Image: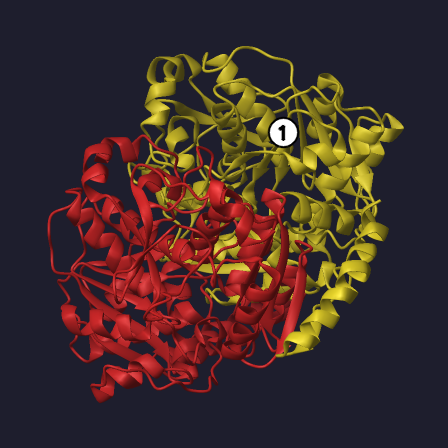
Chain colours: A red, B yellow
Amino acid sequence: MTQATLSPTSRTSATFKNLQCKECGAEYEPKATHVCEFCFGPLEVAYDYNELRRQVTRETIKSGPNSIWRYRAFLPVTSENPIDVGTGMTPLVKSNRLARRLGLKNLYIKNDAVNMPTLSFKDRVVSVALTRARELGFSTVSCASTGNLANSTAAIAAHAGLDCCVFIPADLEAGKVLGTLIYNPTVMAVEGNYDQVNRLCCEVANTHGWGFVNINLRPYYSEGSKTLGFEVAEQLGWELPDHIVAPLASGSLYTKIYKGFQEFIKVGLVDEKAVRFSGAQAQGCSPIAQAYQDGRDFITPVKPSTIAKSIAIGNPADGVYALEIAHKTGGSIESVTDAEIIDGMKLLAETEGIFTETAGGTTIAVLKKLVEAGKIDPEEKTVVFITGNGLKTQEAVQGYIGEPFTIEAKLDSFERALERSRTLGRLEWQQVLV
Amino acid sequence: MTQATLSPTSRTSATFKNLQCKECGAEYEPKATHVCEFCFGPLEVAYDYNELRRQVTRETIKSGPNSIWRYRAFLPVTSENPIDVGTGMTPLVKSNRLARRLGLKNLYIKNDAVNMPTLSFKDRVVSVALTRARELGFSTVSCASTGNLANSTAAIAAHAGLDCCVFIPADLEAGKVLGTLIYNPTVMAVEGNYDQVNRLCCEVANTHGWGFVNINLRPYYSEGSKTLGFEVAEQLGWELPDHIVAPLASGSLYTKIYKGFQEFIKVGLVDEKAVRFSGAQAQGCSPIAQAYQDGRDFITPVKPSTIAKSIAIGNPADGVYALEIAHKTGGSIESVTDAEIIDGMKLLAETEGIFTETAGGTTIAVLKKLVEAGKIDPEEKTVVFITGNGLKTQEAVQGYIGEPFTIEAKLDSFERALERSRTLGRLEWQQVLV
């Protein structure tokens, strides 16, 4: 289905007005478009904040569904029945054991490793993008993905009965490929890295008129990430934290959490507060962290080489905006090695019982690094964002978590193994966690 | 820590009274014990239903936490602060596309594939068991597991800071072993099937005085499954369904869903209603289904051989009680082949966007079989229970879900693949789904 036929369905809601260029402010009808025709800046959704202030209260939000759709007035959709598969309202866990281990007093973990339906924050952006795709009349949806987005687009498209074709780099983790194929979309494994996949998808979007959630639907899609900011504010009792640490891939998640906080302040749902924004990248793909360390205000693209594939974007679309926020809020952007990433995954699992993927390991490792560098005050109310599930990147920790003790079904065989484990088992871990 | 020291902590709550033998009714102090000393019957938790009727209303439940602990008065714990990691209140999905495919009008899917924290219904029973273990003074917790229970016990013990030693059959799926090791418990891989693992654990429980969630803590543990029944009733608007289909392993889940419904009727939270209870087993381990087909009221143990390892219990502890409920309610107990199980997993994924493990595939395949046999009325309000996540049993579907189309990062390479996929891609599926 092509753009020409879409006009009638591209109406807006009382609160969601139009698209606007983030650079020159030019306004656009809210169709499937994402780049300014004049200055080539990215388009963003504009809202009527006076209308939002009139419509929305803490009570109207609380009385909404237990999903991202309780914040519907802040999202760029017009449907009365958006696609709701229970996405969002994931736990904000007050950390005890990890906080103690790191010497922090006020640490919270926002856990999207158990987000519904496909166990990553991508379910938020996809629920919004496919709802908007349906409103715009698309029957085929697509995406350029590092894995989690493919899982989410395929699953939610299956639920909604939309045709789906996803594009992934050919070298993705097995769990992410299988976790996409199971929903029976068409899967294109592209020989190249994410940035090459992304370029190909831009061409396909133009030639086939499909709804690419993170290309021609990107202005709507990216708004879904604001709900992570909204939920944290609500779950903290309608208050903003002092400091957040989030992973950086394209930089979109990080900038949208910031936008979410700003919108809640703007409409009076929370008090104004200066929140420090820190970001996490893998050393094997750290263009934003490198620019931050060098004090540059521009990104130099890199060729990714890290186990943290879900955040391995060498040419991050929103990198410069992320840099700007880190500087403006007094946060830091750090990177960590693949070994530190694995330790981060294990540290979170053994202290909090949360099994995250490599991106989450990156964020925990950076959190640890920032604490050790004195860049996080132990008293600060700090929220760390865990964005995906470890069952999808099993090969990353395979071989680093020890082995079970294989025993016969006999008591004496067990007793011998127990003796071995009491020494050996723990020692293994010390090496990794010190 | 041994039983002798536990008495002071083994007090009860206003609603939870003591333990009672399910066979002879003998009463016991609510300690870590599970078998009647007189008749060797299983012990079950007894409640004061008049007190429950006085204390609990729909409103008091609704105002509780968004987890299983909103039903705390119906659970065998005394702590003011039970271990709450967000377990329970998983989505009850009104099925559209699967229902249409099967010709049903009123199908609901209770989706514990996204239960927190470890993506199976076991998080319910473990949250209750470890809360009670803590009350009884245990510092080391353990379990005999087919995989999901090991994941859950290790994760929630890590969160609660309890020492943990889990026992699994040595031939478990890689995802379940790794999904346990990551939390750093001691893992014993026993050369033998689950029933041999279970026998060994009974010996260890006696010699080490550990809290085995599904052995000496079983009366408390198993009560956690009632919350699946409670949630379905609440999520249906305080009404019971007409028919449920649940997987059968030990038979505990199935019998506890029944107990949950009965308790809600008893205290007046829902109206009395006859609910048909149907059960699902894998043909490679179907002692309960076989007894049902033969019209026997006793179970003949079998040696398991199926891909549905999480429900492969050859000597099911609650098998006879499950049989009794199926007969009494006019339900059926069916079994399906491993091939049908894989088709069930794929059918649920491509119609609803839910990726379940082999146990869920078994339940969906049995649902399909019951519909085709005319044993489910299309109008009946039917709830099917999905109990675990497909990312943990990836090898089961590996090789049955097709492959991605590997392409170069060029438009023409994509176009050629798209042509192939339009024919080939779909055909592959037809073979599987007809």
Q: Quadrant of the C terminus of chain A?
A: bottom left
**Dot 1: what SS?**
helix
Amino acid under disc 1:
Thr
Q: Identify the image quadrant of residue A190.
A: bottom right
Q: Residue at x 16, y 48 (%)?
A: A266
Identify which residue, B179 or B35, lies in the foreground.
Answer: B179
Q: Is residue B306 left or right of residue B125?
A: right
Count of numbered marks: 1
Q: Which residue is mark 1?
A: B255
* Mark 1 nearby-residue class (10 Å; few <14, some 14–19, many ≥20): many
Q: Residue at x 76, y 63 (%)?
A: B421
Q: Position of residue B57 (x, y in %)?
A: 37, 17
Q: Position of residue B135 (x, y in %)?
A: 35, 42
Q: Identify the image quadrant of residue A205.
A: bottom right
Residue B36 vertical placement versus B180 (above, below): above
Res. B105 in view = yes
Q: Residue at x 51, y 14 (%)?
A: B265
